[in-house]
Amino acid sequence: MALKELFGLAASHNVEHVVLGIPHRGRLNFLVNVLDYEFRYLCRKISGKTDTPHDLRNLVDDVTSHVSHSTVKTYG
């Protein structure tokens, strides 16, 4: 995938952090294939179940298609 190559190249130039905002088209694919978001969790979320702690649900889990994920990757 082009983004994995880009991330590897950035790491070789001492880039330590990357923050991305992905539009709806391709976002789910990116979550699963680049950020290693587990597909079973994605299916659970899309089916209407939540992965948000109960006390935060009313604040951050407004739309079931809003899925975010953070991960640490090491390149090189």
Image (cartoon, rainbow, N blue to C red):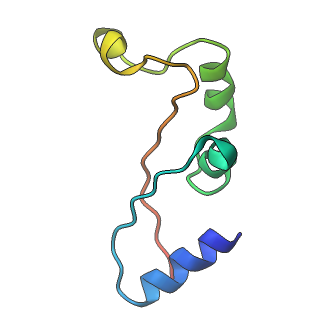
Give how far across and how far down residue 11 sits, in percent.
44, 81
**Relative to 20, is 2 on the left or the right?**
right
| Picture quadrant of residue 47 | top right
Q: Considering the image in quadrants, where does the N terminus appear?
A: bottom right
* Residue at x-position 51% and y-position 16%: 50
Nearer-the-camera pick, 52 or 30: 30
Which residue reaches farthest bottom? 13
Give how far across and how far down residue 37 sits, in percent.
58, 43
* Residue at x-position 61% and y-position 12%: 48
* Residue at x-position 55% and y-position 19%: 64
* Residue at x-position 42% and y-position 18%: 61
Task: State whether residue 39 is above or below residue 55.
Answer: below
Count how many numbered circles sit on residues in the image. 0
**Relative to 43, is 60 on the left or the right?**
left
